[in-house]
Image: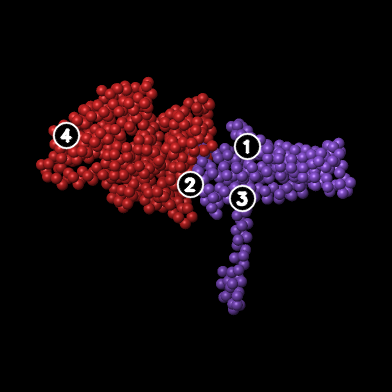
Chain colours: A purple, B red
Amino acid sequence: MAVDQLSESEPIKPGAKEQAALWPAVLNPFGRFGIELNNTLGAMAVFLVRASIQIFRFKQVPEIVHQVYFIGAKSAGIVALVGFFTGMVLGLQLYYVMNKFGAVGFLGTAVSLSLIRELGPVLTAIMITARAGSAMTAEIGIQRISEQIDALITMRIDPLGYLISPRIAAALISFPILTAFFDLIGILGGYLSGVILMGANSGAYTYRVDASVEWLDVRGGFIKSIVFAVLVITICCFQGYFTHMRRDSYGSKSVSLSTTSAVVLSCVMILVADYVVTSFLL
Amino acid sequence: MEPQPLIEFRNVTKRFGERTILQDVNFKIYEGEVTTIIGLSGSGKSVTLKHIIGLLTPDDGEILYQGIPIHRMTRQEWNGYIGRISYMFQNNALFDSMTVFENVALPLKHTSRLGRKAIEAKAMARIEQTELTEVARKYPSEISGGMQKRTALARALVTDPQIVLFDEPTTGQDPIRKNAILGMIAEYKKKIGFTAVLISHEIPDVFFISNRILALWDKKIVFEGSPEAMESFNHPFQNEILQSLESLREDITGLYSTRHFKIRYQTELVRRGADDSYAVLIFSFDNMDDVSASAGHHAAQQTLRLLGNYIRKHFGAVGGFSTRQTINEFTTILPFSDIEEARRILEKFAADFRDHGMRDLEESFRREVPSDQCFDFVISVGMAQGKPQVEIESIMELARFDKQPIATFQCGRWR
């Protein structure tokens, strides 16, 4: 339209038509992406709210317990392992740095606060995403493409209440507990490398852990773990639940791509949310 | 006055992207009837069924349940409507992380107020009826495709629904089980009185249990009527689709399908001279429903198959041709025999069937049917002489009138 008006009112400059057509071609994909992102975020919010309101039903209890076992208990091993070695690396690195300034006595403070405020919630969430989140996306995705979710609808069983709500509840229970577990094991790992292997003072380490960790630090870690739980579970379940809506693939391929998207998106969102929550907490 | 349809499609159109699957589809489903939708693969049969249960919504047109458009129902109305329907998926849609028992019990567990024991009893009853007792604790991946299909069937029927939508319930089954499932649908329809909508390629077997046939062709319903009316339906569907779907011989008995039987009758008898005669025999498996109820559908279908085999063996050898006319009745025409010759062949048939056929059945029942189950049945035969100028239906009626028992099975023993 604009190009037509231009040509009617004044003589056409060479290249004017091409230039006028260039802008929509450049801007349209951004516009489409913006609309799509807006729609997806809206759909995710509705998905989360609709699933969350169905948590508080007595029939959910056995399935919530089952999911706590799957997300929480079964992830404990890998969380402990990662926590232990993270703590050990922290103990080792911080010992070398602090030794330069003669501040080895503050090793306990540095290790414990790094873990409780930052690394614990973030790494725990990433580990749960890798272990349980991906499995959830794949499971729900397969249920979607094999019409099991449609079967639930025909049986008058709300798929959100049946499949998603227990997972949200279980994640809200498991994430903080596993984060606390990660912190504890990490502090022990830091003790092992800093005190036993490198020779820092044992009493100073434990005293500094005890003296420097305050309720505010623990609360911050707890808030982060809750935020990450909501993010991870929403992204992973949403990707699986709507795997059939993907436009880039079908069937089992769409399940594999949804699983990849869920893990990547969850990890990215954990780090983004970590920054946002930290900036509010500080 | 025409009764109010239970479900009605009015100008329903469904598109997936650029592709139109259904175009202005109109049809009616009546309460208490078995309606079968036939059509080629990919013609939109499953899409039609999914519209009824609300898994898909039409792009144009509307679907009415008892006169109320389902997409304008209140939440309460919708719950009431959907609570009356059960759906058996084409690919079964079983939960692969649940056992057969858990799959069957799932809808009861979540939508009924029954206690644990009542749920267990009800689910196990359906599992027994579908001959799945031995695999009740196994997972779907550990059982055969046929068993998975029966698990889906048991799950669809466990809530005693008023309307059941069956999407190809017999695919992947052997001929006896296929007919046993169709028999089960017919029996439940009688017992529970549900309305069934069936998608099936099993022609002519499915015609025995269907009240109405809907033919889906080129995005539209091109035929809506009884199975009998379908045979005289003059449309490209008849030539292109029906003949490709319909087997020359019926799976379970190996006898001609009704349509092919009629074609053979036309070619062999109608052009013969007025003085020529032929013999018509009507065989019936009386008390078939009792056998299904007491000994199971499998036993009833076994009896039908055996009877079909013996008919083929004795009457096929002398140029006769036969068909299964209804669910428990066979018709045989001996085009080159008069009534006396037919009687002699029948005597030999009856002796062989009693001495060998019934003995085989007795042994098979002893193996498969619990010893405390007592059931009786009778095989009867009637004969009549036909003339080319006389309508076959009236000769068959005469033969039916003449029926005499030739073999009786009483409480586990043949007589």
Query: Residue under circle 2?
Result: B56
Tell me, yes or no, whether the two marked residues, 2 and 3, touch with CB atoms within 8 Å.
Answer: no
Q: Residue at x 21, y 43 (%)?
A: B265
Q: Residue at x 62, y 54 (%)?
A: A37
Tell me the quarter of the image containing the N terminus of chain A. Answer: bottom right
Query: Residue under circle 4?
Result: B342
Query: Residue under circle 1?
Result: A70
Res A204 seen here: yes
Q: How far is mark 4 from mark 2, CA to CA?
A: 57 Å
User: Which is more toward the observer, B367 or B375?
Assistant: B367
Amino acid type, mark 4: Ala
Res B68 seen here: no
Q: First in sequence: mark 4 or mark 2?
A: 2
Q: How far is mark 2 from mark 3, CA to CA?
A: 27 Å
Q: Position of residue A161 (x, y in %)?
A: 58, 38
Amino acid type, mark 1: Phe
Q: First in sequence: mark 1 or mark 3?
A: 1
